[in-house]
Amino acid sequence: MKYIFILLGTITTIGIIGMCGCGGSCAAKAIHTNTQQVMLHTQDDIKTVTFKITGMSCAGCSNHIHSELAKTSGIISDVIQYPGNTCIIKYDASKISEKAIIAVIDKAGYKAVVMKDKSKTNTADN
């Protein structure tokens, strides 16, 4: 009888963890780095951009965005923060543009907007 309860508890836990509104797995692996790609780029080509992402409702959503970015040529690394709804992407500007990155995120079903760097804005005002 004890084994039946353990089995049912395990199945229930797996079922609850795997359910989310985005259709993905909530066990998100939201950090992607391709070190081989990093070594092939010159420093001038590598850019970093931060996006505000809307439409994410769970960690599975961030995993879904990550998997789409991982398939995209020119993306070196991505850190998707849920909660927080931000995405920091390091990319090769000679292979992909910010507009193309936004298109990848849009195609995945989310909206991305480039966040302005406040430190640069504040120093420009002084």
Image: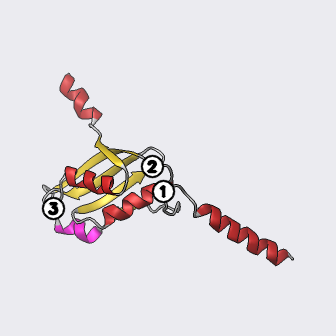
Contact? badges 3 and 2 (CB < 8 Å):
no
Of label 2 and label 1, which has the lower sequence position?
Answer: 1
* Magenta segment: 35-40
Left or right for 87, reference 59: left
- Return the residue nearer the eye: 49 or 42: 49
Mark found first going from the N terminus, 3 or 2: 2
Q: What residue type is labelled 3?
A: Lys
**Residue 100, quarter of picture:** bottom left
User: Circle 1: is it few (<14), some (14-19), or many (20+) Cα within 10 Å?
Assistant: some
Which residue is labeled 3 in the image?
Answer: 95
* Quadrant including the N terminus: bottom right
* Front residue (pair 120, 78): 78
Using the image, tell me which numbered label, if any, was put on residue 22.
Answer: 1
- Alpha carbon separation for disc pair 2 and 1: 8 Å
Indicate which disc, 1 or 3, sits on the residue closer to the N terminus. Answer: 1
Question: Which is more foreground, mark 2 or mark 1?
Answer: 1
Residue positioned most to the right: 1
Give left or right: position of 114 versus 55. left
Q: For the residues marked 3 and 2, what is the alpha-carbon distance in whole angstroms? A: 27 Å
Question: What's the amino acid at mark 2?
Answer: Met
Label 2–label 1 contact, CB within 8 A: yes
SS class of the residue under badge 1? loop
Q: Which mark is residue 110?
A: none
Q: Residue at x 58, y 61 (%)?
A: 19
Q: In the figure, is residue 87 to the left or right of 15?
A: left
Location of mark 2 (residue): 56
Which residue is the extreme one toward the top? 126
